[in-house]
Image (spheres, rainbow, N blue to C red):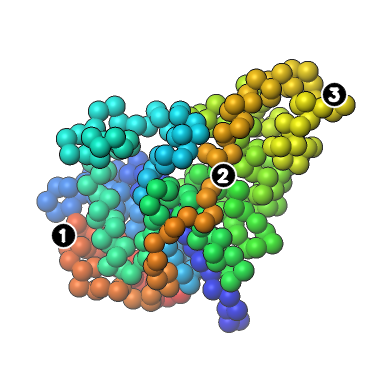
Amino acid sequence: MAKTQERLMVLDTPTLYFRAFFGVPDTIRSPDGMPVNAVRGTLDFVSHLIGTYKPDRLVACFDADWRPAFRVEAIPSYKAHRVLAEAPAGASGADGVDVEEVPDTLSPQVPVIEAALDALGIARAEAPGFEADDVLATLAERWSGHGPVDVVTMDRDLYQMVDDARQIRVLNIGKGVTKLEVVTDAVLREKYGISGNEYADFAALRGDPSDGLPGVTGIGEKTAAALISQYRDLPGVRAAATDPTSTLKPAQRKRIAEAAGYLDAAPTVVRVVRDAPVVEHDDMLPREAKDPIMAAMLAEKFGLKTAMARVIRVMGER
């Protein structure tokens, strides 16, 4: 049966290469000895995703700013634990911009990943002042109504984009690309008792220590889900806390009231931006390498012949 709609796949590229770096042995090296485990793993991830889900359009999304000022202004602790304590000479940290702590042997591999994607003809996109999450969300929002969207990430915050009616789902690679979880509204209802459009408010209540978001003291995942389910959204929960006729327990009222400052700011941090100024790009996935000479040079120089050939093969087999 012929396709009636084109499928867009958007990749949380930093998540892919971080996962590849920590999941693929650093004994994978180029002929001159440079570790290329993150490059190899990322290319293998991409070939598996293309071969399995057969997107018509594919965009590798990147962080233009991994810790945007508007989120830090709202909650200063946002990702603060990931800031490099002392920026290396010449790094952007010297200009007052936070530098993310990245393993020494990963940083040199990122430009190689970018060059490989360019040679293959896989679009790259970012938005000045925004994170990759915002780019993913913006592209998914733009394509909604034109066809299905697969959002590839392991960041649960992007569950807020899940929308069965609009054919947007998340492919969570938290357990690996070959064992990823396809997350739909039905999955979220089974897992949390909420839908994708309720997830951001739920996440704000619950908090996320990995991002420096404290949440509301004493309100964990189950309680946050129950509150959002009962009171519809975060404003509804906060209104219930001040309503003497609501069924909220006294302890919950007290905790929500004490967290007022945090709850004022949390939505700005948790909610992904769906209209970020994403740089224009051609997202059609080609059936052969856009620059075969460069692809061959990169494969030779970095010992990636098998990985590059596999991506090119699955691109052509769609």
Seen from the viewer's position, the closer of residues 77 and 309 is: 77
Specify which label sits upstream in the sequence, 2 or 3.
3
The residue that label 2 is drawn on is 271
Quadrant housing residue 243:
top right
Specify which label sits upstream in the sequence, 2 or 1.
2
Residue at 51% from the left image edge and 66% from the top image edge: 8
Question: Does dot 3 land on a helix, a strand or a loop?
Answer: loop
How many neighbours does mark 1 have within 10 angstroms: few (below 14), some (14-19), or many (20 or more)?
A: few
Does any portion of residue 87 appear in the rendered image? Answer: yes
Q: Nearer the viewer, mark 2 or mark 1?
A: 2
User: For the N terminus, which image quadrant?
Assistant: bottom right
Q: What kind of residue is marked 3?
A: Pro
How far is disc 3 from disc 1 in space, using C-alphas?
69 Å
Q: What kind of residue is marked 1?
A: Lys
State the mark number for residue 60: none
How many neighbours does mark 2 have within 10 angstroms: few (below 14), some (14-19), or many (20 or more)?
A: many
Extreme left residue here? 32
The residue that label 3 is drawn on is 244
State the mark number for residue 301: 1
Position of residue 239 measured from the top left corner of the image (x, y, whole percent): 76, 32
How many neighbours does mark 3 have within 10 angstroms: few (below 14), some (14-19), or many (20 or more)?
A: few
Q: Nearer the viewer, mark 2 or mark 3?
A: 3
